[in-house]
Amino acid sequence: MWRRVHRWLAIVLVIPLVIWSLTGLLFHLKPGWSRAYDMLDPERPAQIHLDKLVLPEGATHVDVFSTAIGPLARVTTPKGDELYDADTGTKRSPLPIDAAQALAVDAIGRSHFASAYGAPTRVTSTETTVTLELADGPVVEVGRNDGRLSQRGPDTDRIDWLYRIHYLQLTGNTTFDKLLALAGLLLIWLVLIPGVVLFVRRR
């Protein structure tokens, strides 16, 4: 009986083992990871003097940096981040669409993977975000209140999909996916225990 149970459970376990080994190999080699998780940065190194910047009440932190649209100060307040012109002290947030686009285009141009983005083909905006869709697939978002950039593309989606497959997050339902992962681990033990029993009996 133990031999039969071990054999059939091992056959079932082949499927998740193949998935784990292939995705694990890809996670080790990381092909295309660098572009997929490229960190776009609007900040340029420069020395800036805050002569006219008056901090709003309750400000807890200030970051000052040079950008393609001039020197900016990112001020953290209890209400969230705000952008100010570091030269004049004028409030810049929410950034106009063209200013946000200029930050994105400049950051892409200074990226090691600039050639993988392409030119902007479509620009949309909300109250808090400007989104650029680029010719080669990536999408770049610019925060209008903080000037921060984020990007993702088809390669990012593909790698995220591999992570979900590896961790057996197959349905999108958090509870069910956790149970599925636990079932996979349980299956390993169910194969291990009959194998140990057979080994001990043979000895």
Image (tube, helix red, strand yellow):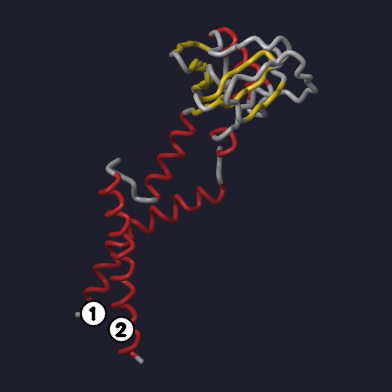
| Residue denoted by label 1 | 2
Q: Is residue 94 above or below residue 141?
A: above
Furthest residue toward left: 1
Q: Return the disc, 2 or 1, that comes first in the chain's sequence.
A: 1
The 10 Å Cα crowd at callout 2, few under 14, some 14 to 19, many 20 or more, is few
Q: Is residue 34 left or right of residue 177?
A: right
Q: Is residue 47 left or right of residue 31?
A: right
- Dots 2 and 1: beta carbons under 8 Å? yes
Say which quadrant the N terminus sits in.
bottom left
Judge by depth and name the residue closer to the eye, 96 or 6. Answer: 96
In x, y percent, where is residue 139? 49, 22
- Locate residue 3: give its quadrant: bottom left
Per the image, label 1 sits on a secondary structure element best described as helix
The dot on residue 201 is none
In x, y percent, where is residue 183? 28, 60
In x, y percent, where is residue 173? 27, 43
The 10 Å Cα crowd at callout 1, few under 14, some 14 to 19, many 20 or more, is few
| Residue denoted by label 2 | 198
Q: Residue at x 56, y 37 (%)?
A: 32
Q: Residue flagged by tag 2: what amino acid is it?
A: Leu
In x, y percent, where is residue 90? 65, 9
- Locate residue 185: give its quadrant: bottom left
Q: Is residue 26 above or below residue 14?
A: above
